[in-house]
Image (tube, grey):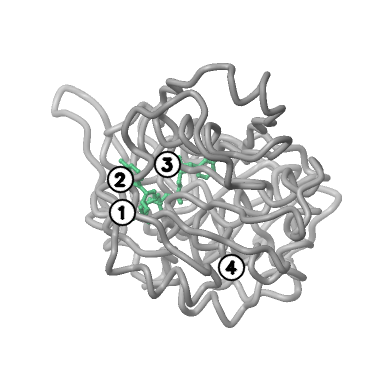
Amino acid sequence: MFKGILIEKDDAGYRAALHDIDESQLPDGDVTVRVSHSTLNYKDGLAITGKGPVVRKFPMVPGVDLVGTVEATSHAEYKVGDAVVLNGWGVGEGHWGGLAQKARLKGEWLVPLPKQFTPQQAMAIGTAGYTAMLCVLALERNGVTPDKGEILVTGAAGGVGSVAVAVLSKLGYTVVGVSGRPEESDYVKRLGATEVLERSLFSSPGKPLARERWAGAVDVVGSHTLANVCATTKYRGVVTACGLAGGMDFPSTVAPFILRAVTLAGVDSVMCPRPDRLVAWQRLGLDLDVAKLDLITNEIGLAEAIPMASQLLDGKVRGRVVVDVNR
Ligand code: NDP
């Protein structure tokens, strides 16, 4: 038996609770992992609360991230005792995830735990941090270098935003954060932002084009915010879009793209091919100041993940939440 959060949906309704689970219930897979830590991402918040259609099969163990050691394996690349990390691949949505003491997975989904990070640090990064790195890589791929100008990061006090600010500032970019929580401005500045702008400047309908300011952007919010970010991005600037914390819609015009040659680069972490994941994790090992992870991270026990899910969706959680599944 092992402990895990189970999400159930039946005539009694949608609910998440801590359970003792029999190992025979684990799904198919060629690697069994003894999980040490997981995390809470925005998507886990949607899954646990049922506020978004994330879970595709019931019962489901949520948790799109996990770190742990291999306990049993028939996969050629892994042996018992290896430290491994998992992010995404539909885990916690259609396949049992990381908010439990054990998981059974496909070996091809796993990546080795990078040597630079402890298991806790890898989860402090988690899907949010690895997605932030994918955004940085997309900016670089599209030619945005530090000399090109300021980079805007929306949702800066959240998980993706915090890691994006920390990485971009270490790489020498001038970073401007956007946050709806004035009380977190100092936190975002300690991560490396030179300025923090109020969320309301971006969240209402704006003009198709406005004063050019940003060489690049990392947007986790979507909706009017993404439209306004595109409208204020400089000629040939690059906007990476990875989130929908403010809405799924994109009420923009083509003006920024056809008159200012702005590039809108979509970023997805879930189905991102393994070679790109390995690059992202390798770059996190080089370009993220691990000392800043302490500032970014709160650690909680497994049962606490359930109430924390609502707080996360309400935008009340700062940075990243690491879940010690054995606590
Ligand atoms: P968090 O909840 O940690 O952070 C989101 C932040 O967005 C909040 O902290 C808040 O920052 C801001 N925010 C929240 N609600 C609103 C709102 N209504 N309007 C404007 N800003 C808002 O989530 P994550 O950082 O983990 O994820 C951020 C987004 O990125 C989510 O939509 C998530 O689904 C998406 N995502 C996508 C991935 C992909 O593969 N494409 C992978 C990971 C995440 P502040 O208080 O500073 O304003």
Residue 189, given in percent of the width and then of the height, sits at 47, 72
Among the two numbered marks 4 and 1 on one chain, the one whose residue lies closer to the N terminus: 4
State how far apart marks 2 and 4 are (Cα). Answer: 23 Å
The residue under the point 42% across, 54% down is: 178
| Three-letter code for the amino acid on which mark 3 is drawn | Lys
Point out the tag, 3 or 1, that comes first from the N-terminus: 3
Determine which residue is flagged by label 2: 200
Q: How far apart in space, not on screen, are marks 3 and 1 (Cα)?
A: 20 Å
**Where is mark 3, residue-wise?**
43
Q: Circles 2 and 1: CB distance less than 8 Å? A: yes
Q: Secondary structure at mark 1?
A: loop
Residue 180: image tag: 1
**N-term mark: 3 or 2:** 3
- Give the residue at the far bottom of this rendering: 291
Left or right of 87? Residue 13 is left
* Mark 4: amino acid: Ala
* Kind of residue sitting beneath label 2: Ser
Which label sits in the foreground, 4 or 1? 1
Q: Secondary structure at mark 3?
A: helix
Residue at the location (57% across, 36% down)? 241
Give coordinates of residue 159: x percent, y percent.
46, 57
Label 1 Cα crowd, 10 Å radius (few <14 / some 14-19 / many 20+): some
Q: Compute the Cα span from label 4 to label 3.
A: 22 Å
Residue 66: tell me if it is visible. Answer: yes
Residue 30 image point, x, y percent: 70, 43
Ligand 1 near label 1 (Cβ, under 8 Å)? Answer: yes
Residue denoted by label 4: 166
Amino acid type, mark 1: Gly
User: Of marks 2 and 1, which one's residue comes earlier in the chain?
Assistant: 1
Q: Quadrant of the N terminus?
A: bottom left
Give the quadrant of residue 261.
top right
Q: Does the residue at mark 3 contact the one at mark 1 (Cβ under 8 Å)?
A: no
